[in-house]
Structures are given as C-alpha cells and as structure tokens.
Image (cartoon, rainbow, N blue to C red):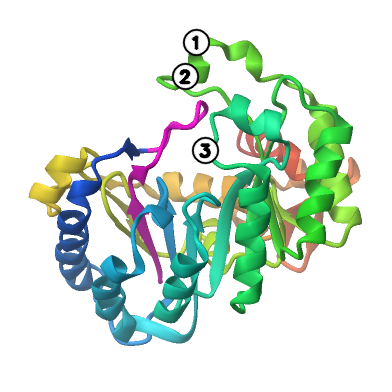
C-alpha cells in the first residue's frame, strides 16, 4: 500500500507547470491540513488500513517545502501507526524554501528521502524556466541535507529546452553527481495547456539525440536507468505505481487507486477544504487494467507478464528485433524511450 499526499501551495508558478497548485493562499494551510486528516479517516475505512500496511509515503506538489514541519506534525502522527517499520518517506522541496531549519524539522518527523526540484544548475536556464531559486540555493540545500544525515536524495532535471546543449546538460548532471545525489529524475520539457509556455510552444524542442545523450551519460556515471525518466537508487514509491499497487491519494487534485477503481478528490482548493469527502470514483475494466500493466511495465524495469500479451508472435518479433528481452515469464524493454511504441504494437 502506498500513500500520496498532495500539497498545492507554491511561492511562484513555473512557466511549464500544469500541476494543481496555487501561488499564495498560505492562510488556508492549517485548514488544508485538517481537511487532509478528515479525508485520511475516510480512506482508512475504504482501504481497510491496518497497522504496518503503508510501505511508502510521497508528499508532492505544488511545493511541500512551503509548509512548516510544525504544521505537518499532526498529519505525521496520524499516519505513523499505519507505516511499515522501514517505510520510505519522500518529500519534494524547492531549494529556495528548503532551509536547513526546515530540513532538520522534516527529518525529525521521519522523512528519509528528499526530492529537490532543481531542474537545472544553469542560472540563465533557471530564470527562463520561471524557477524562483538560484544555483547557490540548489547547492546549499543539497549540502544542508547531506550535513543533516539525509542519504537518499533525488534531483529533478529538465532537458530539451530550446537552448539546451549537450555541454549544458553534461554540466548539470556532473554537478548533481559531484554533490552526491543518489537519484536523478530527468524529464523532457513538454508544453501543457493553460501554462505560460503554452503561449510560446517553440521553447520546447524535440531532439531525440539529447534524450539519448542524457540517458547514456547518466548511465555511464553509475546511476542506472530503471524507468524512462528515472536513474539511480530506485524510488520504492514510484516503483509501486508502475507495479499498479494500491495507493491512497490525499489532497486537492490527488488520485487514489484500489483494485479496479480510481478516486479523485475535489481539485479546487477551497472546495476540497470545505468537503474532502467529495470524491469521484472511476471504475476500471479488466481490459483497462491489462493495458495499464503493459504500458507501465514496459516503460520501467518492472516488465510485463507474457500471459497479458495474447499475440505471442508479436513478442517473438520484438525479441528478434532486440526491442525487448525475455526473462522467465516476463518481457522487458531494451529502450524505455520506445516503450509506448512497443506497447501500441503489442496491443494493436
């Protein structure tokens, strides 16, 4: 069982961001935490939660580092009895708001994995992306985290921005590794509707050679790719998603999943605070679940059970063409960037 908690507050809105987040509205934070607690009470019943059942917690956003450890404390006390002893607890943080005091407080609550939204260590690129932190902020935050004893640290990097070069991306990766991170999430810039970049879509370039360069270079440095965008020490939480494990989704705009149903809490912040029990339910068919297992499995090192693939001749074709390989009763992608195309071929 996984637990995702969505924090929708941000200091500023990045130009590429389409996540459910709000600039300001910090005066609602206390009420929001109370709404999360109320929703969790409902999910305890829905998911039949028992002690030691939650394997991972991921607090994402938005910007979770805009909320103080003191405000988080009641929430952590509530979920603590349901956590496995060795639960992975991740929180996302922006370098400008993750002060050493904040990091210390969050570690004392039990967080043992950090995911820093760095995106780049290049000052000009940070400004053009609409990021509110600087190169120095990013370096300081990672140093502070390591000084406090955090060993499991991830950074996000973005590539295929219009002025990206192999030299710039190599410097970003080299610095992340020099700072001693255990994980890198490297995302291709995509233009989403209703974002500032939607007005200037030309800022994103489709350069497959850069994607390959990023992947090959990070792999060559010892952080092995285990999903299309992820390298290094495996995030147990994300790995659980790709395995299609059950997960609770708390918060405005979060998503939950149980067996054959998805749960969508109200995405509007004020409406969620008023009624966190307002949750839409989507039923999934057996075919929906089969297709999801194939898509998720082939884009990661989870792989796919061969029995989910009715046309074995297509599997044999892909093995001959060295697009996939078979290990026992599963097949695995040899190139995660081709995973969607492979899936469409297999199910077509």
Foreground: 83 or 178? Answer: 178
Local SS, label 3: loop
Q: How far is mark 2 from mark 3, CA to CA?
A: 15 Å
Question: Reading the chain from its start, which is encountered first: label 2 or label 3?
Answer: 3
Q: How far is mark 3 from mark 1, CA to CA?
A: 20 Å
Q: Is residue 259 magenta?
A: no
> In screen coordinates, is 197 left or right of 160?
left
- Confirm whether residue 305 shows in the render: no
- Numbered badge on residue 132: 3
> In screen coordinates, is 46 left or right of 245?
left
Q: Where is the N terminus found, in terms of image quarters?
A: bottom left
Asked whether disc 2 touches disc 1, contact meaning CB atoms under 8 Å apart, the reply is yes
Q: Residues within 10 Å of mark 2 (few under 14, many from 20)?
A: some
Local SS, label 1: helix
Q: Range of the magenta residues?
A: 1-19
Judge depth for marks 3 and 1 and give the one in front. 3
Q: Where is the C terminus found, in terms of image quarters?
A: top right
Foreground: 240 or 126? Answer: 126
> In screen coordinates, is 292 left or right of 118?
left
Residue indicated by mark 1: 199
Q: Position of residue 341 (x, y in %)?
A: 69, 33
Q: Residues within 10 Å of mark 1 (few under 14, many from 20)?
A: few
Residue indicated by mark 2: 196
Residue at the left extreme?
274
Q: Is residue 14 magenta?
A: yes
Residue pictured at 58% horizontal, 13% vertical: 201
Q: Residues within 10 Å of mark 3 (few under 14, many from 20)?
A: some
């Amino acid at each position: 069982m996984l637990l995702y908690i969505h924090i929708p507050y941000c200091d500023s809105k990045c130009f590429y961001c389409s996540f459910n987040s709000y600039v300001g509205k910090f005066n609602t934070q206390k009420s929001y935490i109370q709404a999360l607690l109320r929703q969790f009470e409902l999910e305890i019943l829905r998911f039949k939660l028992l002690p030691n059942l939650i394997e991972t917690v991921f607090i994402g956003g938005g910007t979770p580092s805009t909320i103080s450890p003191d405000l988080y404390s009641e929430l952590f006390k509530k979920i603590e009895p349901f956590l496995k002893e060795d639960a992975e607890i991740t929180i996302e943080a922006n370098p400008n708001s993750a002060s050493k005091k904040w990091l210390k407080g969050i570690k004392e609550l039990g967080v043992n994995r950090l995911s820093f939204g760095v995106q780049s260590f290049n000052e000009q690129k940070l400004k053009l992306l609409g990021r509110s932190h600087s190169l120095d902020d990013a370096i300081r935050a990672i140093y502070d985290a390591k000084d406090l004893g955090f060993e499991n640290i991830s950074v996000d990097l973005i590539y295929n921005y219009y002025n990206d070069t192999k030299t710039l991306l190599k410097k970003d990766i080299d610095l992340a590794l020099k700072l001693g991170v255990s994980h890198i999430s490297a995302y291709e810039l995509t233009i989403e509707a209703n974002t500032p970049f939607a007005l200037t879509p030309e800022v994103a370039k489709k350069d497959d050679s850069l994607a390959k360069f990023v992947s090959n270079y990070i792999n060559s440095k010892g952080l092995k790719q285990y999903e299309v965008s992820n390298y290094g020490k495996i995030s147990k939480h994300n790995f659980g998603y790709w395995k299609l494990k059950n997960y609770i989704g708390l918060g405005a705009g979060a998503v939950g999943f149980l067996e054959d149903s998805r749960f969508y809490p109200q995405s509007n912040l004020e409406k969620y605070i008023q009624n966190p029990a307002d949750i839409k339910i989507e039923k999934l068919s057996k075919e929906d679940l089969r297709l999801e297992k194939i898509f998720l499995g082939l884009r990661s090192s989870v792989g796919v059970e061969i029995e989910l693939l009715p046309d074995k001749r297509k599997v044999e074709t892909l093995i001959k063409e060295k697009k996939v390989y078979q290990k026992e009763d599963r097949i695995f992608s040899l190139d995660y960037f081709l995973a969607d195309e492979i899936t469409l071929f297999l199910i077509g």
